Amino acid sequence: MQILNLRLMNFRNYILEDFEFSKNKNIIIGNNGMGKTNIIEAIYYLALTKSFRTNEDESLINKNHQSCAIRGEIKTKTTIDYKIIIEKAGKKVFINNNQVKRISDYISKINVILFNQEDLKLIKDSPSVRRKLINMEISQLNNEYLKMLSYYNKVLKQRNTYLKSMLINNMIPKEYLNIITEKLVDIGMYIYRLREEYIDDINTLLNINFNKITKKDGIYLKYISDYNSLTKEKLLKKYEKNLNKDLNYGKTTIGIHLDDFVFYYQDELAKNYLSEGEQKNAIISFKLAEVNIFYKKTKTMPILILDDLFSELDTSKISRIIKFFKKNIQIFITTTDLNKVDEKILKNSKVFKIKGKTIEVKEYD
């Protein structure tokens, strides 16, 4: 999978800009605030209809305009035109100029793996951050997962509202709560199985990658869930047993919305056992595993984005990441300094140098 070109219209600091990309490596250089990250943010948004920098779509629109647009041609077996128009009232998505009514039907068409500085904190971050990442990745592979996740959140909200009503008014019948709970369990089991499958796939590659980088063994990802290996009947009993607690809190205190995916090393929490450098290597190993999983599932390489990692990782680690991949993967690298980029990385790359309102382009053989 490759993005051949990109057009930005009123997107952040770009009023109208066209980019033609290399099918191999694309290196985007510029001082902070010049707009280099805006380019890869647009690619990511074109794939997932979300930014990795903000939850406020309106902030993506240039301050002097009412809307913005991102357009790109993606090549797999064929070349397809994708476009997203972002307005203050919402967004619209198009494939080959035909509007797609539901966002969930659009997502999973373009596969992107992003690796940035925030990911290096993944081991120490809160469970919600890890859940968000896993949800985004699985959604790219299976848009039905995204639909079911949205449905789960809707039913969860209904259950929480009903719990609060029951707490206030003891006369409210419990039967409706049982119906909602059963629905929540059914959807939750579907989501649990897909998450479990994804974590299992990660674990088949995670330690292999870690060993190649560090010559050490024992890294794995543990999936922690209230649904772990339970039948529907046992889960319903678990919710029943937990009812008084749910009523006291006015919300559902068990479920897949509280799942976590924890890094372990030799049966110890990785965040307590591994050094900072080893934790970074574990995250690198995780991302490398994701790329291979995407290739296995979709039969095409995802687009890989390495955002400003030269400030966090040394050149040898960046080179090691790139060496893992087959030649047919398209890579985007952002950096503030071309001197930090190894000559081996520069080979077969296209460099975009952002200087104020001008963009210099140079190709390296």
Image (tube, grey):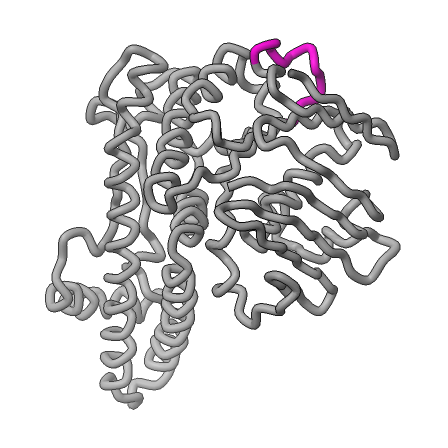
- Provide residue 70's location: percent of width, then percent of height: 70, 52
- Provide residue 226's location: percent of width, then percent of height: 23, 54
Looking at the image, which is closer to me, 25 or 340?
25
- Provide residue 335's location: percent of width, then percent of height: 67, 23
Residue 308 appearing in the image: yes
Query: For the point 15% across and 66% down, which residue is it?
Result: 232
The answer to which image quadrant residue 169 occupies is bottom left
Query: For the point 79% across and 28% down, which residue is it?
Result: 354
- Provide residue 351's location: percent of width, then percent of height: 70, 24
Looking at the image, which is closer to me, 234 or 203?
203
Query: For the point 34% across and 45% down, which residue is it?
Result: 297
In the picture shown, does residue 360 fall above or below 201? above
Residue 118 appearing in the image: no
In the picture shown, does residue 3 fall above or below 101? above
In the rendered structure, which segment of residues is drawn in magenta? 334-344
Magenta-colored stretch includes residue 221: no
Query: For the point 24% across and 32% down, which residue is it?
Result: 204
The answer to which image quadrant residue 276 occupies is top left
